């Protein structure tokens, strides 16, 4: 944490952690960001090794990381630290740009795909980095953040994007692997891939 920053008892009791909250804090969660302008409870640099380990271990039932992992220096180190903070059975909910659209932002350092969960599955030793996490959900989204679309393109184009999203997103999720391998680029790429992992109870 930043110098002279201490968590109060109420903050320490919160069971949900929101990493990289930016301007979107989650009510009831301990909201963390590295930027002082963020609406965060705690200013913490996730690129500083072990920074998360200053928080209570085995305490959190849910950790949310929405569009922050792609900005980090070492994704696997941060996820290992998150697993240390989760209670058994706790979940980590990750949203990141899909690789087919993920490098349109100059600060994005990593690409994510359907193979990302393999790195947390000890049954796949060729990929396994640890920690052991069980995948509960994986989802592709062709378009997200229509509020931003509405600020930068005409209304009729937003309407077209919404219609295409209602068609392409369900189709992609019939077989995310097939979409990622073959046809994601045919439709301009997918803006988001979402994972929900659970920490095993034993």
Image (cartoon, rainbow, N blue to C red):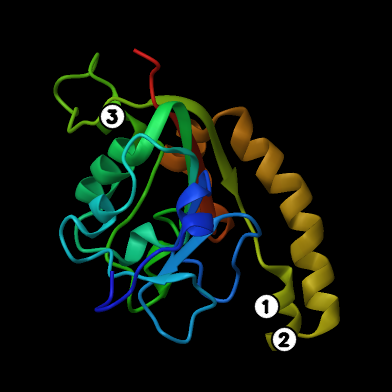
Question: Which dot, 3 or 1, sits closer to the camera?
Answer: 3
Residue picked out by circle 2: 151
130 vs 159, left or right, is left
The circle on residue 7 is: none
Residue 122 in view here: yes
Q: Is residue 90 above or below residue 49?
A: above
144 vs 111, left or right, is right
Residue 193 image offset from top left, x and y in percent: 50, 48
193 vs 42, left or right, is right
The circle on residue 148 is: 1
**Label whose residue precedes the other's in the sequence (3 or 1):** 3
The quadrant of the rendering that contains the C terminus is top left
Residue 57 image offset from top left, x and y in percent: 31, 40
Residue 24 image offset from top left, x and y in percent: 60, 70
The quadrant of the rendering that contains the N terminus is bottom left
Residue 48 image offset from top left, x and y in percent: 18, 66
The answer for how far apart the CA atoms under marks 2 and 3 are is 38 Å
Residue contact between numbered discs 1 and 2, judged by CB atoms under 8 Å? yes
SS state under label 1: helix
Q: Is residue 13 above or below residue 174?
A: below
Between 174 and 22, the one lying in front of the other is 22
Residue picked out by circle 3: 120
Q: How many marks?
A: 3
The answer for how far apart the CA atoms under marks 3 and 1 are is 33 Å
Q: Residues within 10 Å of mark 3 (few under 14, many from 20)?
A: many
Between 55 and 119, the one lying in front of the other is 55
The answer for how far apart the CA atoms under marks 1 and 2 are is 5 Å
């Amino acid at each position: 944490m930043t110098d002279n920053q201490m968590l109060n008892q109420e903050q320490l009791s919160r069971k949900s952690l929101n990493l990289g909250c930016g301007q979107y804090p989650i009510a009831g969660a301990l909201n963390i960001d590295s930027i002082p302008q963020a609406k965060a409870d705690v200013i913490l640099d996730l690129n500083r090794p072990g920074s998360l380990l200053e928080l209570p271990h085995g305490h959190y039932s849910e950790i949310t990381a929405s569009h922050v992992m792609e900005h980090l220096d070492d994704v696997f180190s941060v996820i290992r630290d998150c697993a240390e903070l989760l209670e058994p059975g706790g979940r980590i909910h990750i949203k990141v740009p899909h690789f087919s659209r993920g490098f349109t932002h100059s600060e994005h350092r990593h690409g994510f795909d359907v193979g990302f969960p393999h790195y947390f599955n000890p049954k796949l030793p060729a990929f396994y980095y640890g920690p052991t996490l069980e995948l509960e959900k994986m989802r592709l989204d062709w378009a997200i953040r229509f509020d931003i679309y509405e600020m930068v393109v005409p209304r009729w184009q937003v309407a077209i994007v919404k219609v295409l999203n209602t068609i392409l997103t369900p189709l992609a999720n019939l077989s995310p692997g097939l979409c990622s391998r073959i046809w994601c680029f045919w439709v301009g790429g997918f803006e988001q891939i979402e994972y929900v992992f659970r920490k095993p109870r034993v």
